[in-house]
Image (cartoon, rainbow, N blue to C red):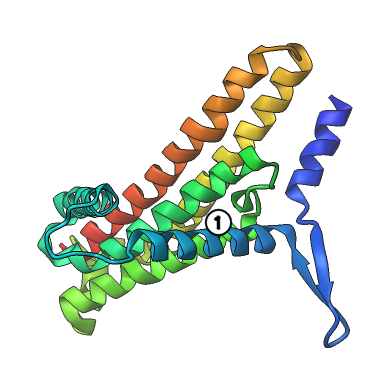
Amino acid sequence: MGSLAEELMNELNCETAFTIPVFGGIPVPESVVATWIIMAFLVVASLYLTRNLQIVPTGKRQVFVESCVTFLQDFFTGIFGEHGKRYVPYLGTVLLFIGCANLIGLFGIKPPTKDLNVTAGLAIMSIVLIEYAGIHQKGVKGWVKSFAEPMPIITPINILEIFIKPLSLCMRLFGNVLGAFVVMELIKIIVPAVIPVAFSLYFDIFDGLIQAYVFVFLTALFIKEAIE
């Protein structure tokens, strides 16, 4: 258990990948390097998948891409209606990023979602978008008045939700990813043979994709609340 606690602390500590030799040295954490790798992969994949698009698709690549985009649009539009259609590109991008971030551990790279700073950054971006959606839909006056709904006495609670929502998104994603790591380490200690492989497939693939889905689904629900 002592080794597990030590390994857990190493996971919580954001190690420096390298240092940029300017201004006395700027440390670059491993999570930032992993994020750069994911960004590069998504950009290259996007350029490849959207190359030589046709008005009437004939290739399997374009049909696949259009099917995925249509599915995401229909899914999120079903949650917050046509008024929220403008937010689908952001939600789709975050879904792809978190999914890749949780799967990158299969290639021996530390997932950036194990860094609390990364999950906090994603949560802050989402809450800014949520509040923007409310202002865009209701106007500034309507957005301010919404804090007194359904009755003025709960205004402090509604204001507090601005800080509770990003904290909930941040800690849920971070806690589930870190919790999966702790469970895997315990399984490796108790049954170090074949069983960890099956559980690794579950936690690294299925659970990682589920966490990406939960994050964007909750963000979509919060947007729906903001624009209603």
Mark 1, secondary structure of its residue: helix
| Left or right: 180, with 65 as reference point | right
The C terminus - image quarter: bottom left
Q: Quadrant of residue 148?
A: bottom left
| Left or right: 5, with 118 as reference point | right
The spot of residue 132 in percent (x, y) is 30, 75
| Left or right: 20, with 164 as reference point | right
Question: In terms of depth relative to the viewer, which is nearer, 183 or 66?
Answer: 66
Q: Residue at x 81, y 45 (%)?
A: 10
Q: Amino acid at mark 1?
A: Thr
Q: Residue at x 51, y 34 (%)?
A: 205
Image position of 174 with respect to 49: above or below = above
Q: Which residue is mark 1?
A: 119
Question: In terms of depth relative to the viewer, which is nearer, 146 or 74?
Answer: 74
The spot of residue 193 in percent (x, y) is 74, 12
**Can you see residue 155?**
no
Q: Residue at x 17, y 53 (%)?
A: 58
**Can you see residue 221?**
yes
Question: In terms of depth relative to the viewer, which is nearer, 83 or 196?
Answer: 196
